[in-house]
Image: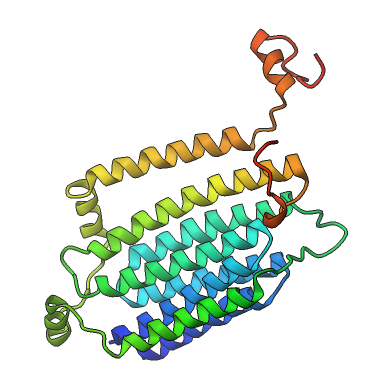
């Protein structure tokens, strides 16, 4: 049953990824990415990573994807024609991933699991309980430095993105620094 | 019980599709979509190996930080794309070949 669900969600993920690969319409690609992310979240849940699955839905589907769709709408004239992206590097762009695919799938047969994974597979001591509590405990003890650094990174990204996206002309900086006419900085 | 090789095959396929999207598309947003696909493929591998590590959960912890960094990357990259579009009125990466504004 679990295996069947895994195949179903893997098929959903791969089908929507293939739609992204073969469509040239950016909005179709963005909406197809929603199904791809949801399928990946379901696969996380099936492999015992419930918190990662919820995080995937909240951060990717709720955050990154909305940002991407905003980006599509802000950087194209969508009112007149569909948003079509052009292609380039077609020969190498398909040959290189295909070669990588053959290489990686080919080496899969000689995959040697490490000892602890072999033992875990034999004893079937897989993750069974909820992972929220151990993740929280580890985040506050063993990984507290990385946690704080991730917080600083997010703060920097927030400030940087807000600063970058602000439409600032060179005149407006001079005007606002003197404190005059901040309402309409384009006209000094 | 899902075999580990199934996860690895799925992640490999997803990574290769993401790589193809990243290389072949001209539009900057489409390139970002391919990048997100590749990051998700890497996360699937991390979570799959983390199943065998029920106490430490190092793979899931790493996947969590990958998601955080991916969110920050997407926000900054989209701000850059919007800014560049506001200046040049194009979002095609191969036409943006000048460093001087």
Can you give x and y, in whole percent of width and height, for residue A17 in the image? Answer: 56, 76
The residue most toward the right is A80
Give the quadrant of the C terminus of chain B: top right
Give the quadrant of the N terminus of chain B: bottom left
Eyeballing the image, is A78 above or below B5? above
Q: Is residue B55 visible?
A: yes
Eyeballing the image, is A76 above or below A145? below
* Left or right relative to B35: residue B96: right
Q: Is residue A9 visible?
A: no
Can you give x and y, in whole percent of width and height, for residue B3 in the image? Answer: 29, 87
Query: Is A38 in front, or is B65?
Result: B65
Among the 4 quarters of the image, the one containing residue A107: bottom left
Q: What residue sits 64% from the left and 62% below the top? A: B30
Q: What residue sits 62% from the left and 72% below the top? A: A32
Among the 4 quarters of the image, the one containing residue A174: top right
Q: What residue sits 54% from the left and 47% below the top? A: B75
Query: Is B63 in front, or is A66?
Result: B63
Q: What residue sits 43% from the left and 81% below the top? A: B10
Eyeballing the image, is B73 above or below A86? above
């Amino acid at each position: 049953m679990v295996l069947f669900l895994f195949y179903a969600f893997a098929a959903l993920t791969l089908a929507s990824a293939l739609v992204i690969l073969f469509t040239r319409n950016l909005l179709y690609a963005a909406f197809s990415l929603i199904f791809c992310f949801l399928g990946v979240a379901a696969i996380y849940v099936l492999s015992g990573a419930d918190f990662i699955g919820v995080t995937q839905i909240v951060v990717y589907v709720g955050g990154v994807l909305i940002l991407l769709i905003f980006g599509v709408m802000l950087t194209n004239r969508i009112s007149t024609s569909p948003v079509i992206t052009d292609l380039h590097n077609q020969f190498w762009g398909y040959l290189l991933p295909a070669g990588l695919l053959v290489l990686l799938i080919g080496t899969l047969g000689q995959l040697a699991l490490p000892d602890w994974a072999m033992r875990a597979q034999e004893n079937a001591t897989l993750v069974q309980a909820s992972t929220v509590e151990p993740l929280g405990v580890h985040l506050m003890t063993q990984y507290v430095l990385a946690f704080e650094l991730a917080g600083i990174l997010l703060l920097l990204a927030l400030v940087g993105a807000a600063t970058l996206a602000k439409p600032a002309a060179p005149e407006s900086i001079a005007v606002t620094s003197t404190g005059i006419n901040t309402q309409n900085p384009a006209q000094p | 019980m899902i075999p580990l090789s199934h996860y690895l095959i799925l992640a490999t396929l997803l990574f290769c599709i993401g790589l193809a999207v990243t290389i072949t598309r001209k539009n900057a947003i489409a390139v970002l979509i391919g990048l997100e696909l590749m990051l998700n493929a890497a996360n699937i591998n991390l979570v799959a190996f983390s199943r065998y590590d029920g106490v430490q959960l190092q793979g899931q912890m790493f996947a969590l930080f990958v998601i955080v960094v991916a969110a920050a990357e997407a926000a900054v990259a989209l701000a850059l794309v919007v800014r560049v579009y506001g200046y040049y009125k194009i979002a095609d990466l191969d036409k943006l070949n000048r460093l001087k504004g």
